[in-house]
Image: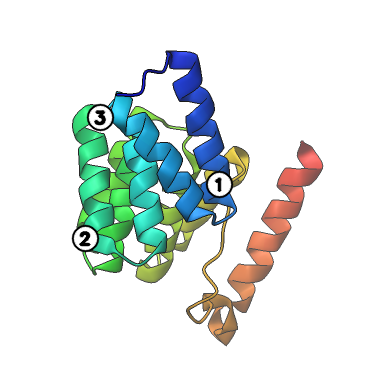
Amino acid sequence: MNSMNEEQIQEKYEEASAAVDVARFEKAEDLLREILEVDPEHAGALNKMGVIHAYKKEKDKAREYFEESLQAERNNAPALTNLANIYLENGNQHQAENMYNEALRYDPEYGPAHNNLAAIYKKRGEYGKMVNSLKKARKAGTISVDHSEKSIFLNPGCLLFLGLVVVGLLLIFWLQ
């Protein structure tokens, strides 16, 4: 069995994370497997394996890795958020919302959870909550927009709201 110290494990994990970021999944999987061979309960490596399987549209396998990551480290905000994403994709919006909020209890600044909550609030028409969550996601540097569905801003009834949001954001940037 390969032996690595904590520093070597961290270096491999960072290399694997960088590989995932540029969709080099095979390389990332190899590195993560090396980590898991030495530390089978490495929560970060388990979570990243789940991310890889989610990208490959292998939801069941992704869910298994996210759950294993949470068994290793219950307060793992990224794994909670990723598992919530699976629930949301499967139509369980209520469970996903609960998990995003749980992730935020462990890490109140975790931007992806704020961003994903904003998407739920958007679907429910809770635009005040949506804007609040997007502000927190922006502060964390993680705002992302799902272009796969029709934007609420294409609805003529939302043009006033859009104008108010733009003015509000301009004020926020101007006051900083």
Image point (71%, 45%), residue name: 172
Amino acid at circle 1: Ala
Residue sitting nearer the eye, 125 or 82: 82
Q: Which residue extends farthest front?
A: 1
Image quarter where the N terminus lies is: top left
Place of residue 114 in the rendered image (x, y in percent of width and height, measured from the top left): 45, 47
Earlier sequence position, callout 3 versus callout 1: 1
Q: SS of the residue at dot 3?
A: loop
- Judged by depth in the image, the label closer to the viewer, 2 or 3, is 3
Q: Nearer the viewer, residue 155 or 5?
A: 5
Q: Earlier in the sequence, mark 2 or mark 3?
A: 3
Question: Pointer 1 and pointer 2: residues touching (CB < 8 Å)?
Answer: no
Residue linked to disc 3 = 40
> What x and y, as percent, mark residue 143?
58, 52
Q: Give amino acid for label 3.
A: Pro
Disc 3 crowd, CA 10 A, few/some/many (<14, 14-19, 20+): some
Q: Are marks 3 and 1 in contact (CB under 8 Å)?
A: no
Where residue 97 sits in the image (x, y, percent)?
A: 29, 52
Q: Secondary structure at mark 2?
A: helix
**Residue that appears at 35% across and 46% down:** 49
Q: Which residue is mark 2?
A: 60
Gap between marks 2 and 3 measured at Cα: 19 Å
Q: In the rendered image, is residue 4 in sight?
A: yes
Distance of label 3 from label 1 (alpha carbons): 20 Å
What residue lies at 56% left-to-right and 50% top-to-bottom?
21
Q: Which residue is mark 1?
A: 19
